[in-house]
Amino acid sequence: MVVLEAAGLSKHFRARRGFFGGDRGNVRAVDGISFAIESGRTLGVVGESGCGKTTTAKLVLGLEEPTGGSIRFEGQDLHALDAAARRHYRKSVQAVFQDPYASLNPRMRISAIIAEPLTTNERLTAGEVRGHVLRLLDLVGLPNRSADLFPHEFSGGQRQRIAIARALALSPKLVVLDEPVSALDVSIRAQILNLLRDLQAELGLSYLFIAHDLAAVAHMSHAIAVMYLGKIVESGEAQTLARAPKHPYTQALFSAALPSHPEDRREEIVLSGEVPSPLRPPPGCHFHPRCPHAMARCGKQAPALDDVDGRLVACHLYGASTAAAAA
Amino acid sequence: MSTHPLLQIDNLSTHYVSARGTRVVRAVDDVSLRIDAGETLGIVGESGSGKSTLALTILRLLPPAARVASGRMLFEGEDLLAKSDAEMRRVRGKRIAMILQDPMASLNPLFSIGDQVAEPIRVHEGVGRAAAWSRARELLKAVRIPSPQTRLLQHPHEMSGGMRQRIVGAIGISCEPRLLIADEPTTSLDLTIQAQYLNLLRELQRAHGLALIFITHNLGIVAKMCDQLAVMYAGRVVESGPVRQIFNAPAHPYTQALLNSIPRMSDNRNRLAAIDGQPPDLVALPPGCAFAPRCPSAFDRCRESPPSQLTFGDQRTVRCWLADAGSDAADSQVRKGAA
Amino acid sequence: MSLQTEAVGLPSRFDIIRIEGFPLLPVLILGGIAFVAIFANVLAPYDPEIGSLAARFRPPAWQVGGSGEHLLGTDHLGRDVLSRLIFGARVSMVVGFTAVIVAGVIGTGLGIVSGFLGGWVDQVIMRITDTWLALPALTFAIFLTAIVGPSEMNIVIILGAVYWTRYARVIRGEVLSLKEREFVKLAIVAGCSKRTIMARHILPNVLNSAIVLGTLMLGVVIVTEAALSFLGVGVPPPKPAWGLMLADGKKGMMVGYWWLTVLPGVCIMLMVLSANLIGDWLRVKLDPQLRQL
């Protein structure tokens, strides 16, 4: 069952006007992307800075309003929802962010931090709230007495557990995980990733997992979407995509991932140049100036996201006309 | 070629002392390392493991609260700790250079790229501005910056993160140092840019016969770049040796656990082997081995006294009572020493 | 696993850079002035507003012509200077603290609203602030008193109205960076209303800055109050304000009645200096950057 579905989702920011009032155009942070997150599963989103993955997270969380396209939650378009249904959506979609030091208000006790979503949305007695807080602490593996302490009394990994407990307070259906382990010590990351997977199995949660660590995304995700300059260039089942990427950008990205063993020598595709500014993306396929397989057509016509061997790829290499030319 | 290593560190300890002198944090504790010319040494550890303090100690750039408590650091046969500040200034940037994590913080926003790349050349080699600038142009070319002539006149804010980090790299190698220390040089870079940069560093290293020390928390960088590895935990080197040997047969439980806890691209259905507990608190370290509270194979002795460094095989060391128990000879030696 | 041993890692680390140098003397001076102000009725030997014309311009006790009757001498109306200084401390304290609080409440409130809501609200508040700051504070205050007339209450309100902009500026800047912090975003995700977020997440985190700013503003406000009184548009006579005493005594300077100006001047200086030194210390002490490192 699909929990959340985005169709043609876009977020364009108007760039600051220049000194003489000239309009410098739109930044297409997210440009017509479509994806679906199934119940109890994880969609991993990867890409480099400026690719739009964080904006995508903000759109899903309602922190930004989309400028185009739609988000459907449990089959209903968010735009069409009345106030009560929107509140239900808000409660069903929670988040865990990267920096566990910035995620917790330093002036609030842990019990108040974890209980805030509850006290804001539901009418509960103090005793009921306390009960919920203790149950949530237990769920993330922290002792009961943590409830009365302040955030600075915890290490990074423990704070991230607190942030997870808070995100689970309203029994959400979907949790957006924006780089949940990249600010943590290496020896702590596995604890948190395991915890997230255990919670998914136990509570049937869906995750939107955003990270730059490809191995962590491949480990956590059922499906992966690869973004480049605001568009999804490839998406599909996590393992097959990670093992045999099809889009030239995905290939380069996964080949640039660091090896897990010194004898693990892979063929490396080193891209030339840098990610262009999203203010002036290249015409046609955004990736063509850096693409080792670029053809004349790539600079003129943007490829559509098409089905290639059971996965979606936006590349002319796999297009129908290429196949026809080859035949 | 000289017979001694390029840099040899023996029993080095660096302590931070609190303002009242009541608290001592052993940020670097009895560390011994060596690196030969042209070699790459990876120093891996979590935050608070002492890896960055070690780098600052080598360059003698410690903050006022820190002091070197013991040990020596022989660089090309000369003890760096015995040098005067003026002598040390001639070593820094000239014979030992450093690249820091944040390229924006490493570059002065008010000066042009040309000024900043040429500065160490002018300071250390006393050449004129024009000559230094033409050297700077060559350096930008060497770090693959397109149209170096125009870039020389630009300022840091006009460049992307990857380009800035390459400029910091150009400054690092500007005086052809023998040793380059890179402290988390790629954490602020994107994956594809990181790959470009690491390959560039490797080429520079080959071209100039540089020795590289990589300070990182990322075992992937070590696997890709390094010949030798030292794993630090709570200020101590718990294991060191050739990278391949350690990855194939880690001797210390911490190294084993660290290697096992990293997610791999190839399998995604197995649980990760997580390390329990929290990183050590340097102010309140346990009396025995610092890793003992989190170690799956700890026994009584681990909690009582800290293991000493044990050398085995070809250039490998480990600080662990388990390995110690494995070799009876060393075991009896330590007992004799203790008696 | 034991939480106690795990959890101490962070706070203990900043012992290394603990800020020392508690400003003992300034605290004693300010505390002393506050004490005197509170117990003025008990401490003052005479009524500060009533003098005897027979005992005009008596010098302090240690000078020729002085007596133990009036330890710090008398003024042109024969009023006891010591008593006037003691009651003047009360005026300075009351006016100073209330004006700082009035300015702080207005400024912090508007700063939070402006920074958090942004958009046109921010534009309006900030343009008003700019206009306010462009006016010279003292002239502005004189202008306002000329409209509403001098009284202790009015001075407090006027000083609050003149100085709130300094808070608004600083607090707005802090809110802008706090707003981007993840716990604020998470509060939005949790469904908190804007008002709740401002009260629960923003206000407690800018309170430190507001307190530091208040201590530093105390000096400014006291000097302005003294200046207004000196110019005759402040606390109306015969109330003993230090600035007023300074103004009354200035004619006596030339003929050697130095105690009428120097003594209130020293009092103003000590109070302002102490407030500023405490403010400086608090600023370092409460700076989250230094504290949480």
Image (cartoon, helix red, strand yellow):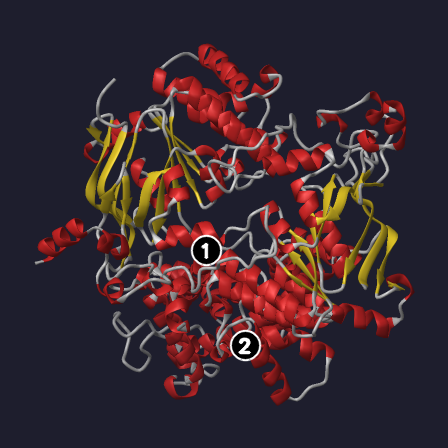
Q: Nearer the viewer, residue A13 or B244?
A: B244
**Which quarter of the figure has residue B241?**
top left
Q: Which percent across, then down, holds residue C90?
A: 47, 78
Q: Is residue C129 above or below residue C264?
A: above
Q: Earlier in the sequence, mark 1 or mark 2?
A: 2
**Number of marks present in the image shown:** 2
Residue type for callout 2: Asp
Question: Which residue: 52% across, 15% down?
Answer: B137
Residue type for callout 1: Ser
Task: Using residue C256 as the reference point, say whether residue B110 is left or right of it.
Answer: right
The residue indicated by pointer 1 is A187
The residue indicated by pointer 2 is A138
Q: Residue furthest right?
A: A80
**Which quarter of the figure has residue C170?**
bottom right
Q: Quick check: can you spot residue B30?
A: yes
Q: Secondary structure at mark 2?
A: helix
Q: Which percent across, then down, holds residue B40?
A: 38, 31
Q: Is residue A34 above or below residue C27?
A: above
Q: Separation of disc 1 and disc 2 at Cα? A: 22 Å
Question: Which residue: 83% across, 57% down?
Answer: A5
- Name the quadrant of the C terminus of chain B: bottom left
Q: Which percent across, then down, holds residue C176?
A: 65, 56
Q: Which percent across, then down, holds residue B285?
A: 30, 62
Mark 1 neighbour class, 10 Å CA radius: few under 14, some 14 to 19, many 20 or more: many
Mark 2 neighbour class, 10 Å CA radius: few under 14, some 14 to 19, many 20 or more: few
Dot 1 falls on which chain? A
Q: Is residue B37 above or below residue C8?
A: above
